[in-house]
Image (cartoon, rainbow, N blue to C red):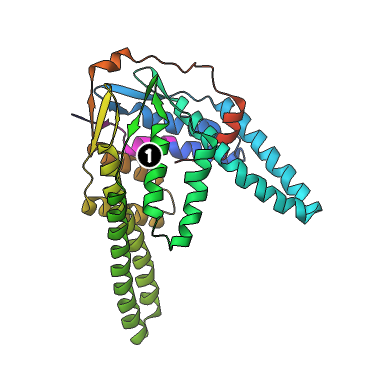
Amino acid sequence: MTKVSFNGDGKEFFGIWIVNTLLSIVTLGIYSPWAKVQNTKYLYNNLSIDDHYFDYHAQPIQILKGRLIAILAVIIFALLSTVNETIYFIGLVVLFFVAPWLINKSISFNMRMTSYRNVRFNFKGDYWKTFLWVFIAPILSLFTLYLALPHVLRRRDEYMTQNYSYGNALFTCSMSSKVYYKAAFYAFGAIVGISLLIGIGVMITAGIGLEVLNAMVLLLGYILIIAASASTYGSVIRNHYFQSTKIDGVASFNSSVEIGEFFQLISTNILMIIFSLGLAVPFVQIRSINFLSVNTLVSIEPKIDDIIDDVSKDSSALLDEVADAFDIEI
C-alpha cells in the first residue's frame, strides 16, 4: 500500500488564504468564489497518491452565479415572511423537504469538480434515501433514547459511500454497527471522565475564590471534551470506514489514526485558532491534512487504467451550483 502524500506548506498557504480573505471582505463577499477556488485548488494540487495529484475544476463564475441566485431566493423568502408569519412557517417546512435535494446536489457538484488521474468523482444520491438516513432516522432514534443512533449513522455512512463513484466505477462499503457502538461508548466515556475532572476543578477554584481561574478551567474543559470525544469517535470510525471501503479492482484503503495523536492534533488546533483570533486557520488546515494523509494508505490496482471518465467537463448544472451555495459538506 502507498501512503497518501501531502506537500502543502503552512506559510505558503497562509499567504494565499490571507489575501483571499481580505479581498473577500473588501468586495463584500463578491470575491469569495475566487477565494474558494484558489484555496481548494492549492490543497488538492498538493495532495497525491502514487505520484498522481488531485485537481479541483470549479470555476469562480459558476460558484458566484449559484450564490447570487441562492441569496436572491433567501431575500425573497425573508421579505415574504415579514408580510405574513404563516409564509415563514410554510417556508421552514418546504426547506425541510428541500434539504435532501440540496445535500445531493451540493455533494454532486463538489465531487464532479474533483479529479484524480484526469478522472472525476461523482455522487448520485437518492432523494428519499437521503431524506431517510440524514433526517428521518436520526430523529426517530430519539424515541430509543438515541440507543439506535450508532446503527443509524452506520447505515447513513454506507448509503452515502455506496453512491460515490470514481469515473464509471462505484465505491463499495460494508461496515459494522458494533464498531459504531464501540466508538460511541469510547466518546461517551471520555465526555463523562473529563466532565468529572472539570467539576472537581471548578469546585476547587470556586472554593478559593479564583473566578478567573474558574473560567479558564471551564474553557480548557470544553476544549478537552470536544477534542477527546472527536478523537475517540473519529479515529475508531475513520479507521473502520477506510478498511471497509474499496473500489473493486481499482483501489482499497486503510487508515491508522491513533486516538492519542488525533486528540493532540484536535486540541492544539482549537487552541491555535482561539489564541490567533482565527488567523491560524490555514496552518490548522495544512497540519490536519498532513496528519490524515500520513495515516491513510491506498492500494492502487491494475484496473484503474481502465476507468472511464463518464462525467462531462461541462456537465455542471445550474441547480447544482445553486445548491452548492449553501456550503453543505458531508
Residue, x 54% and y 39% (percent of image)? 128
Placement of 189 over or under 304, stated as above or below: below
Left or right placement of residue 241 versus residue 147 in this view: left
Residue, x 70% and y 53% (percent of image)? 89
Q: Which residues are the magenta region?
A: 4-16
Residue 204 position by quadrant:
bottom left
Number of numbered callouts drawn? 1
Question: Do we see residue 16 in this rendering?
Answer: yes
Percent coordinates x, y for residue 179 in the rendering: 27, 50
Percent coordinates x, y for residue 241 in the rendering: 30, 41
Outermost residue, left side: 1
> Mark 1 = which residue?
158
Q: Nearer the viewer, residue 293 or 208?
A: 293
Percent coordinates x, y for residue 293 in the rendering: 27, 36
Residue 287 position by quadrant:
top left
* Residue 12 is inside the magenta segment: yes
Question: Do we see residue 15 in this rendering?
Answer: no
Q: Nearer the viewer, residue 171 or 12?
A: 171
Placement of 261 over or under 226, stated as above or below: above
Residue 202 position by quadrant:
bottom left
Residue, x 69% and y 48% (percent of image)? 91
Q: Quadrant of the C terminus?
A: top left
Percent coordinates x, y for residue 174 in the rendering: 31, 38
> What amino acid type should be assigned to the residue bearing mark 1?
Glu
Outermost residue, front side: 144
Q: Nearer the viewer, residue 241 or 11?
A: 241
Q: Quadrant of the N terminus?
A: top left
* Residue 280 is inside the magenta segment: no
Crowd band around label 1 with a 10 angstrom C-alpha radius: few (<14), some (14–19), many (20+):
many
Residue, x 34% and y 18% (percent of image)? 117
Outermost residue, right side: 83
